[in-house]
Amino acid sequence: MDIPLIRKFECGYDQGARAAKAGNEVLQNFIGTTGAAWSDPVRGGELAKGQIDQGADVIYAAAGASGIGVLQTAADQGKFSIGVDSNQNYLHPGSVLTSMVKRVDLAVYGAFSDTKADKFTAGVQALGIKEDGVAWAYDDNNKPLITPEILAAVEKAKADIVSGAVKVHDYMSDNSCPK
């Protein structure tokens, strides 16, 4: 759905793709502008096929249930995909390169722990890479796809983001996305 949060996902993916290989082109599509966009796997698959036809090698599906169609189409076309929100690697082992995982479990645990310790305060709390609030999924389903060089590059990128050596653009405070 074309909303700022999904544009934030797109911007982060764009920055990562370009950092991984200079000159990478990032294509983007949105299924729609209403809540129906989250539950249209057929349309998700059609858009994925269109990107593959334009030369896409990897498709990142930040699309709710519509992403199931994206992952399926990528697998059917022999391309890689990246799942989102939870570990979706198991859906198409060998095709889902990884998944961007939101560690909601840690956020909930933290809220419960703070409540139990009588330290809970209401408000927004952002948990990023440094706090392990977002992560990438690495398991037996994608392990054959991840070379030691890729693993080292991912760990270096993570360390560079945590240390501040690499700045990830905050789309929510500045809705431009550096290219």
Image: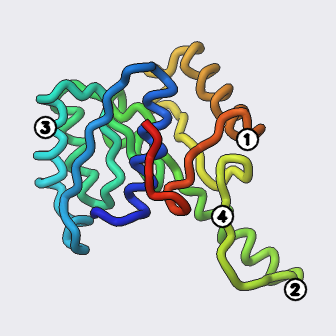
As displayed, is residue 172 above or below residue 88? below
Foreground: disc 3 or disc 4: 4
Q: Secondary structure at mark 3?
A: helix
Q: Which sits earlier in the primary sequence, circle 1 or circle 4?
A: 4
Q: Residues within 10 Å of mark 4 (few under 14, many from 20)?
A: few
Tag 1 residue: 162
Residue at 35%, 53% (x, y): give it.
Answer: 62
Q: Which sits earlier in the primary sequence, circle 4 or circle 2?
A: 2
Do the numbered discs 1 and 4 sit on residues whose CB atoms are within 8 Å?
no
User: Which dot marks residue 49?
Assistant: 3
Foreground: disc 4 or disc 2: 4
As displayed, is residue 132 above or below residue 106? above
Tell me the kind of residue under disc 1: Val
Q: Calculate the distance from the C-alpha at mark 1 to the C-alpha at mark 4.
A: 14 Å
User: Which dot marks residue 126?
Assistant: 4
User: Which dot marks residue 118?
Assistant: 2
Q: Calculate the distance from the C-alpha at mark 4 to the C-alpha at mark 2.
A: 20 Å
Q: Which sits earlier in the primary sequence, circle 1 or circle 3?
A: 3
Q: Calculate the distance from the C-alpha at mark 3 to the C-alpha at mark 2.
A: 51 Å
User: Which dot marks residue 109?
Assistant: none
Q: Quadrant of the C terminus?
A: top left
Do the numbered discs 1 and 3 sit on residues whose CB atoms are within 8 Å?
no
Q: Secondary structure at mark 4?
A: loop
Q: Calculate the distance from the C-alpha at mark 3 to the C-alpha at mark 4.
A: 34 Å
Residue at 44%, 41% (x, y): give it.
Answer: 13
Using residue 131 as the reference point, say whether residue 80 is left or right of it. Answer: left
Q: Quadrant of the N terminus?
A: bottom left
Do the numbered discs 3 and 4 sit on residues whose CB atoms are within 8 Å?
no
Q: Which sits earlier in the primary sequence, circle 3 or circle 2?
A: 3
Q: Secondary structure at mark 2?
A: loop
Using residue 42 as the reference point, say whether residue 148 is left or right of it. Answer: right
